[in-house]
Amino acid sequence: MAIFRKKSVEDRNKTVNIPDTELDVESVMRKYDRESNTRIWTGKSAVAIRIFMALFSAFCIYVTLGPAMLEQARLTSFVGLIIVIGYLNYPASKKHVRANHIPWYDIVIMVLGAGAFFYYAFNAMDIVKLSYGGVAKNPALLVIGIIGILSIVELCRRSVGLPILFVAGFFVLYAFIGKNLSLRRVVYELFYGENGVLTTPVNVCSKYIVIFIIFGAFLEKTGIAEYFISLANRLFGAAAGGPAKVAVVSSALCGMVSGSSVGNTVTTGSITIPMMKDNGYKPEFAGAVEAAASTGGQIMPPIMGAAAFLMAEFTGVAYSNIIVKAILPAVLYFAGIFIAVHLEAKKLGLKGISKESLPKVWALIKKSYLLLPLIILVYLVTSGRNTMAFSAATAIFAAIVVSFIVKENHSGGRAVVRTLGKFVEALEAGAKSCISVASACAVAGIITGCITVTGLASNIINAVVNVAGNNIFIGLFLTMLCCIVLGMGVPTTANYCIMASTCAPILVKLGVDTLAAHFFVFYFGIVADITPPVALAAYAGSAIAKANPMKTGINATRLAIAAFIVPYVFAMNPAMLFIDTGVWEVIQITVTAIVGIFGVAAGLSGYLAKPLHWVLRIVVIAAGLLLIIPGGLTDIIGLVVIVLVFLFQSFVMKSKVAA
């Protein structure tokens, strides 16, 4: 879902003087973000493909809001179109890209792969009536199924990468070798049955995720990313270490919509990272701040990237309830990063941006209409009177209206043409961003299908439960390791699908609340993007900052420490997710948890009122953890300890210096 991007290669080729910073951004995107490794189309070819992709987005909106279709026909036509636009955009290798060129073998794979799904779509009614025996006796249907599966797997390799395919390959091999399933059975289950490609991930992707991706593309065309950065500058730019605080706030807001850790790190980081370095932050710290904040955008309500829609489907909890319950964990995550950069600024004696350089308040007020689509979306979703699809479609319409309001350096008919051009570009950008998400969802469906058909899920659950015994903490720790390892290089959406099918049931069996269990695997799937050794977002930030990648990854992990603590807390005490709590308890938990995060951040940074001795650092971290854990006694102990340390630094150490 990488929405906020720099200019495409095609657009840049039309420019004579290209700034070095922009070239750096594009090279970093192509290195760390597979979604940027696309074919180069120019001239009439580019126009034709742009129109086709815009029509795809329009088709998705129509199908979502239009008359009901047979589900199998809807899903197979969706995947078939994804294969067409996918192979038109993604080459077999980024090393063999030529302008306006697609190899003959890619055309063959595209036609055969899309044809397999379109054949299913046109004959869905008859195929649905067939049992396994009917498919197994028809060689043509088996060949069609194999072609369809292989074509979507290859597209996933091109647009997402190999890690998820290694996972899928393991489970498919287990189906063949571990359970001795025949090729006919596997093809039937994964292509024609209810336990494969056409399951929950692709269903949710086609119904909800796609339309929200398109909404994000329209938001980008209104210039909301630049507005977020300007707004954050006005609010926090003048504070101590202002550029870092601007990076935290703007990246949280942009990442919420874009849903791409790497894409958001590079695009907003190209502006914020140089500002942080100029302000006095070390390069590895500047890159880490941007990576940690951009990664956290996916847990930021109300959009939360894409996995929140899947969570609603897996848990049966309304999406509007999920975004409410996600508020406090998200606040704690970003509060931890914000406090850490503030303490770092105090320790280094850094100042903020001069007030004369900040955006003017009136200019921001005049552009506040850019927030209208988001406000409408939040209102419609939380009101509970409309479906998510209708809410997103209405918000898209609002974004179109806003795009007409945005002033251009044209007048009359030229302004209208320019706006219509943006309209088509937004539809195209939405379609392009759908490719990797949809292909990852399809492969995630293959993984979950193999787990279901082979009964491996119950075996995994029993094995972990036996190892953990009655100790929930051990079960949580093992689940965390699984999520981080599987999440390395795997998109959050696909990672969550896998973990929701395998690890979330383990936690539920250990006694963890269902929603808390799904939030737990969701969080640790996300932080894989900043956890070494495969921390793609952190490495992208290090490339922009020209810093050591491993140091940047370690700093990003330290800054995002809340993401490693908070999930354990709400898994063992779901009160943090506002489950079975009253108003007073919510207020108490919120305040004490934020103070606790402050203590942990102070201990990790080594600075409170003054630099902390290593013994006091451990004491403050422990006190912070006590405050984060919901409970009256732990809150009192933690608060007293932090206050005593602060007073000791402020008065006792001050008097010693004076003496």
Image (spheres, rainbow, N blue to C red):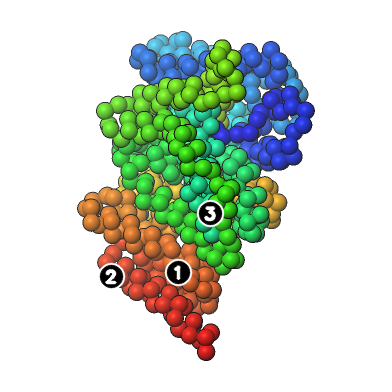
Q: Alpha carbon of mark 2 to alpha carbon of mark 3: how far? A: 39 Å
The foreground one among 604 and 235 is 235
Provide the residue designation for mark 3: 238
Q: Do the CB atoms of the residues marked 3 and 1 lie less than 8 Å apart?
A: no
Provide the residue designation for mark 1: 621
Query: Which residue is at a point 65% across and 54% down the rendered structure image?
Result: 277
Q: Mark 1 Cα within 10 Å, few/some/many (few <14, many 20+)?
A: many
| Kind of element beneath mark 2 | helix
The foreground one among 322 and 352 is 352
What amino acid is labelled 2 in the image?
Leu
Residue 495 to residue 538: above or below: above
What amino acid is labelled 1 in the image?
Ile
Residue 123 to residue 531: above or below: above
Residue 44 to residue 404: above or below: above
Provide the residue designation for mark 2: 633
What amino acid is labelled 3 in the image?
Ala
Query: Which residue is at a point 57% across and 49% down the rendered structure image?
Result: 356
Q: Alpha carbon of mark 3 to alpha carbon of mark 1: how far? A: 29 Å
